[in-house]
Image (cartoon, rainbow, N blue to C red):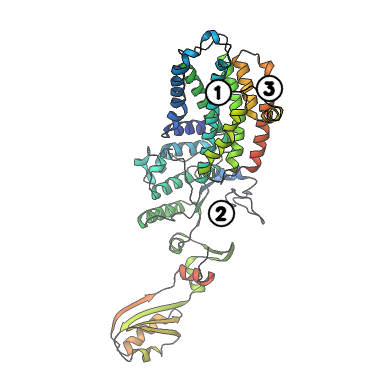
């Protein structure tokens, strides 16, 4: 069915790592930021205070930012590929369109998981991961969230006119969502109007899911979040299938 | 061209390639054809061999030997080079390799040599002739009439999406541009007078002792030579100008600048 998916994914992965800022920008920089941040803020992240909001917020914020940077990178790559006629050239082969796009999604998921694991390993000494945090579950939750945000990314990639606008437009749409998503201020404490608005943002459900899984909630406690992310994925995929431009 | 390759849905009419509908049976068709697109690019940092290997993995049918193709196309030394480091001619040769990787029955080449220098262009012409000699059907578009004249068995002239005429290049020239021109340089003052008597002469233009004689028919040049020798006109230059496909194209599509 998806002939060539494995080959294309592996190839795109290698090509991405050859970019001057590819591996450094996606994996090394987040790890460095985390280490620097951990060194300066580390002492204040007292394990005794692990009930504190910050202790949950830091890993979740880091995870969300990793996910968003993956999406922005995807939006840019798709825009560059479209502008350069690369998408068109790939389509003029027996490759199915969904294979071409799936390969990019697979690369981004792989990088997201790698970055998250690298950040956790690097931060292990300064901010030890508390016992009982289901790491595999957390990575899985982040991947589910990333797929959903990637679907939003595809809608953005469909509408940006040129590659030059891809990154800023994507950032302008995604980053403000982070502020409202409940990381900094719990959604329930927002004024009613903002509360309703926040509940329309997909990132709100991402944050809720990640926080819950980090805190050790069972998956069954977050079926609502999963359903919301599934809905975002389905809607955005359907929308971008209609408006996506190959050239 | 993109409708024929199955990349674009035709607004009207129907297309059949190898008995298949390019739009609805695009995947079956793509197994059997090779395509080189106008102004295509690949990933900047993909290596030549990686592109060839990826393409080879995409087809169900037995594919051509990628290394041999690279050898034939003079790309062996560039096997490990990134796409972005290739010259225009090398990129175009790589695209030809990718178009040939599935050993296709029909090869579509869209403005193959646009933007290439004369050496690269000639090298690619040799390749296309080679494909033709190996029995492949090559379907190419070009703005270069010289290219069409040298490579094609049959040429279709298209204006605003309509085919105006289709035939072998020589027959198109004979049909649409039967006139011949002879350029003669002479200081003989009686020359103009004698030239006027040549049969089927249509026009004489003189500029500083150089005459351009234009006439119809295959005997026209012989008639000019006969006239020169009969009247013992001493010439310092003599050349014939035969119409080319370019003249046919200009005649059929007009001389005004178009998009």
Q: State left or right for residue A222 relative to residue B46.
A: right
| Residue B122: image tag | none
Q: Secondary structure at mark 3?
A: helix
Q: Give the total number of marks visible in the rendering.
A: 3
**Disc 1 to disc 3, C-alpha distance:** 18 Å
Q: Secondary structure at mark 1?
A: helix
Q: Provide the chain ID for the residue under circle 2.
A: B
Residue that mark 3 sits on = A188
Q: Is A173 situated above or below A208?
A: below
Question: In the rendered view of the protein, which quadrant contains the N terminus of chain B?
Answer: bottom right
Q: Nearer the viewer, mark 1 or mark 2?
A: 1
Residue that mark 1 sits on = A61
Q: Nearer the viewer, mark 1 or mark 3?
A: 3
- Res. B78 image quadrant: top left
Q: Is A131 situated above or below A19?
A: above
Q: Is residue A2 visible?
A: no
Who's the residue at 37% across and 39% down the image?
B81
Residue A228 location (% of width, % of height): 68, 27
Residue that mark 2 sits on = B1
Residue B131 location (% of width, % of height): 45, 51
Please rate how many residues cluster around mark 1, counting C-alpha atoms within 10 Å: few if below 14, some from 14 to 19, many from 20.
some
Who's the residue at 48% across and 52% down the image?
B135
């Amino acid at each position: 069915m998806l002939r060539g998916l494995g080959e294309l994914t592996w190839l795109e992965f290698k090509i991405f790592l050859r970019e001057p800022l590819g591996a450094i920008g996606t994996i090394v920089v987040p790890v460095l930021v985390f280490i620097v941040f951990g060194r300066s803020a580390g002492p204040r992240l007292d394990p005794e205070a692990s009930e504190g909001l910050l202790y949950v917020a830091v890993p979740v914020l880091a995870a969300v930012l990793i996910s968003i940077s993956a999406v922005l990178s995807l939006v840019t790559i798709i825009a560059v590929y479209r502008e350069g006629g690369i998408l068109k050239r790939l389509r003029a082969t027996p490759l199915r369109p969904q294979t071409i796009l799936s390969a990019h999604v697979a690369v981004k998921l792989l990088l997201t998981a790698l970055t998250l694991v690298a950040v956790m390993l690097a931060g292990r000494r300064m901010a030890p991961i508390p016992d009982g945090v289901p790491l595999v579950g957390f990575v899985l939750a982040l991947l589910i969230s990333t797929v959903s945000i990637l679907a939003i990314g595809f809608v953005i990639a469909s509408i940006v006119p040129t590659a030059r606008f891809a990154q800023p437009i994507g950032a302008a749409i995604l980053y403000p969502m982070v502020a409202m998503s409940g990381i900094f201020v719990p959604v329930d404490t927002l004024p009613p109007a903002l509360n309703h608005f926040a509940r329309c943002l997909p990132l709100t459900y991402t944050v809720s899911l990640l926080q819950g899984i980090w805190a050790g909630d069972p998956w069954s406690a977050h079926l609502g979040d999963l359903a919301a992310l599934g809905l975002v994925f389905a809607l955005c995929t359907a929308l971008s299938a209609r408006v996506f431009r190959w050239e | 061209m993109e409708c024929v390759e199955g990349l674009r849905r035709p607004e009207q009419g129907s297309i059949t390639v190898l008995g298949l509908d390019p739009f609805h049976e695009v995947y079956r068709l793509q197994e059997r054809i090779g395509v080189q697109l106008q102004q295509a690019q690949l990933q900047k940092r993909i290596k030549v061999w990686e592109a060839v290997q990826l393409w080879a993995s995409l087809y169900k049918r037995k594919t051509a030997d990628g290394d041999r193709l690279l050898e034939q196309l003079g790309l062996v030394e560039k096997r490990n080079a990134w796409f972005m480091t290739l010259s225009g001619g090398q990129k175009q040769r790589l695209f030809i390799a990718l178009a040939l990787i599935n050993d296709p029955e029909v090869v579509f080449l869209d403005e193959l040599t646009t933007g290439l220098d004369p050496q690269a262009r000639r090298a690619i012409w040799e390749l296309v002739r080679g494909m033709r000699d190996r029995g492949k059907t090559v379907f190419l578009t070009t703005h270069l009439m010289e290219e069409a004249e040298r490579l094609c068995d049959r040429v279709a002239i298209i204006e605003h999406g309509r085919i105006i005429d289709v035939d072998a290049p020589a027959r198109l020239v004979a049909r649409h541009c039967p006139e011949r021109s002879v350029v003669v340089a002479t200081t003989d003052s009686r020359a103009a007078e004698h030239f006027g008597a040549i049969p089927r002469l249509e026009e004489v233009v003189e500029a500083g002792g150089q005459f351009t004689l234009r006439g119809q028919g295959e005997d026209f040049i012989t008639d000019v030579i006969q006239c020169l020798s009969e009247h013992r006109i001493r010439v310092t230059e003599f050349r014939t100008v035969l119409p080319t496909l370019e003249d046919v194209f200009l005649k059929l599509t007009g001389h005004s600048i178009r998009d």
